[in-house]
Every structure is written in C-alpha cells, then in structure tokens.
Image (cartoon, rainbow, N blue to C red):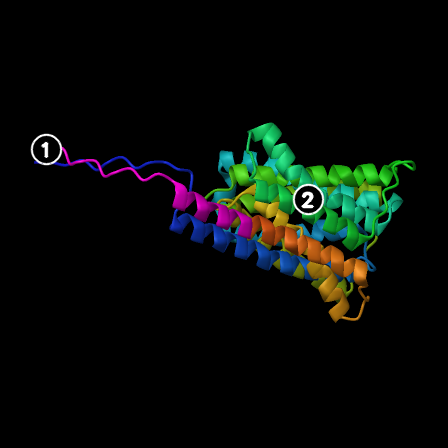
Amino acid sequence: MSSTPAPTQTTGIPSHTEARVRLQADGALALITAFWGITFVVVKGALSHGDPFSFLALRFSIGALALTAVARRELLVPQTLRRGLLMGVFLFLGFALQTVGLVSTTPSRSAFITGLYVVLVPVLGLALFRRVPRLSSWVGVVLAAVGMRYLTGAELDAGQGLSRGDWLTLGCALAYAFHILLTERYAPKSGVVALVGVQLWVVSLLSLLCLPFAGARVEWTPSFVGAAAFCGLFASALAICIQTWAQARTTAVRVALICSMEPVFAGVYSVALGYETLGPREWVGGGLIVLGVLVAELGGHLWDKVRARTAPRLPDAPASE
C-alpha cells in the first residue's frame, strides 16, 4: 500500500515561516537605515576636506577591496558580473546625480526629491514587472511622501518650475528606484557578497572617471581617510550586503518605505550631536514617515490574518491505495 499526500491549496497567504523571515528582513533593513542616518554627519565633515567624487572613489574602493577579499573568484562568475554591472551603474547614478544636482538646488529640495523614490518604486514595479502592491502599502507610500515634504521643508512652486538641479535630483530618485527594483529581482539567496562587490567596483571606477571633469581636491587628513574607511566598510560593503540579503526575503515597496526613514534617523542624530534643532514641522514630517511604515507593515499583517481566518478550508483528501 502506498499513499500520496493531498495537494495543498494555494491561498497567497504567507506561512508563519515566511512571515517570520520577512519580519527579520524588515528588521535588518530598519537597522541599516538607522546606521545610514549616521553617515550624513560623517560625510558632511569629510567633504570639507575633499571633493565628492574623490570621496566616493576612495569610499567604494575600500568597500570593494574588502568584499573582494571575501568573495574572491565568485566575483568573476559571468551572471554575477552582468547583474552587478547593471546594478552598479544605477547605484552610481544615484550618488552622482544627487551630488551634481546639489550645485543648483537647495538641500531641502534635494532631500525631498530624492525621497520620491518611495513613490517611484511601486509605480515602476507595477509598470515594468506587474507587481501590484497592497492597499496598505500604497497608503504607507503616500504618508511617507507627505512626511518627507514636511521633514525637509521643501517648497516646489509649480509656477516657478523645476531647476536644473531639481531635474538632476529627480534622475537620482529614479536611479535609486531602479536599483531597489533590480535588487529585488536579482538578489540571490547566496552569493550576496560577490554581487555587491561588483557593484562597489563599478561605483568606484565610474567615480574615478568623473574626476578629470569634476576637479579633484583632497586634503589627506585623518578625518577624511577615516570617514572614507568607515563609510566604505560599514555603510557600503556591510550595509548593502545586508540590504541585498533582506531584499531576497521581502518586497521592493517595503524596502523603499523602510529606507524612507533614513532622514528621520539623520535628524535625530543631528539633534543629539548638537548640529541643529528640529521644530514642529520636522517632527510632524518624521512622524508621518514612521506612521507610513507602520501602516504598511501592520496593515499587511492584519490583512493576512483576516484572509487566513476567512480562507475556505478544503477537507483532507483520502489516501489512495
């Protein structure tokens, strides 16, 4: 006698194991987002001793060397090279367009326009990959976008129009959105270090190619080198590896929402270190971003529970003899 198991019914509701893994991934993303908030203060101090592209070249070279020492020959796998090259180009465009755009726009407008990747990720995901976000995710995206507007205090006057720097920064937001979507699509369950290592090499080399046009200016002070090493090893190599690992276990929209909390953490650190004081507008904006993340997260969990309770249960099929 032999028996075959009854087929399981697919309801689209995540299992307890899947939900736990996704929660772990979201928690890891929240931690690195909090960590990235520190780098605003670190990079601001470093750029007083060198130009942005020299800093980027040194920062990403250090990170790439560290990951190469770990991954070694895995970096040369053809599929890893192809994917890492494509993702690295978008990662570089995000950094470069934001840096150049800051020349002809204000920091608050730059921060707000960059934060629009939160809106662009679900829109592009729907258009390119037919990924339809949940209603709770859309509500969270809108709350986060409005919160970004209040947090940065950006005034985008429709009559005035967008400046050249604004358009470049919008290109930066588009590049970051594509990078998040590509990471979701290509993020492997294993081989993360090699994939990120290729991306860091791409950003480093493209930054070096920009130096003749941007003009290199470097004071080799301990603070400049230390900031580049800190950002290269932790904010780039380690953090992007964790992001890639997490995106193999969660969705691009959730990543965009969680990463939208980066300016919130940056503001908290800046206040704690005495660089600035936040007013009611900044606290409202930060609160809306946090609320947006909570709505997307808790709303998704509550919806899964409702679906699990209302989903029809099929009787077990009798064993065949």
User: Which amino acid is tagged 1?
Assistant: Glu
Front position in the image: 119 or 31 = 119
Q: Which mark is residue 142?
A: 2
User: Which amino acid is tagged 2?
Assistant: Val
| Residue 187 horizontal/vertical position (percent) | 51, 42
Count residues near mark 1 (Cα–Cα under 10 Å), then give few for <14, some for 14-19, many for 20+. few
Q: What is the CA distance from the residue labelled 2 to the residue labelled 1?
A: 56 Å
Query: Is residue 253 rendered to the left or right of residue 286?
Result: left
| Residue matched to label 1 | 321
Q: Is residue 261 visible?
A: no
Q: Residue, x 61% and y 28% (percent of image)?
A: 127
Q: Residue, x 39% and y 51% (percent of image)?
A: 16
Between discs 2 and 1, the one toward the N terminus: 2
Task: Quarter of the image for the N terminus: give it.
Answer: top left
| Residue 232 horizontal/vertical position (percent) | 65, 56
Query: Is residue 229 rendered to the left or right of residue 244?
Result: right
Front position in the image: 182 or 252 = 252
| Residue 152 horizontal/vertical position (percent) | 79, 53
Task: Quarter of the image for the C terminus: give it.
Answer: top left
Does the segment drawn in magenta span residue 237?
no
Query: Is residue 304 rendered to the left or right of residue 291?
Result: left
Q: Residue, x 59% and y 31% (percent of image)?
A: 126
Which residue range is magenta in the image?
A: 298-321
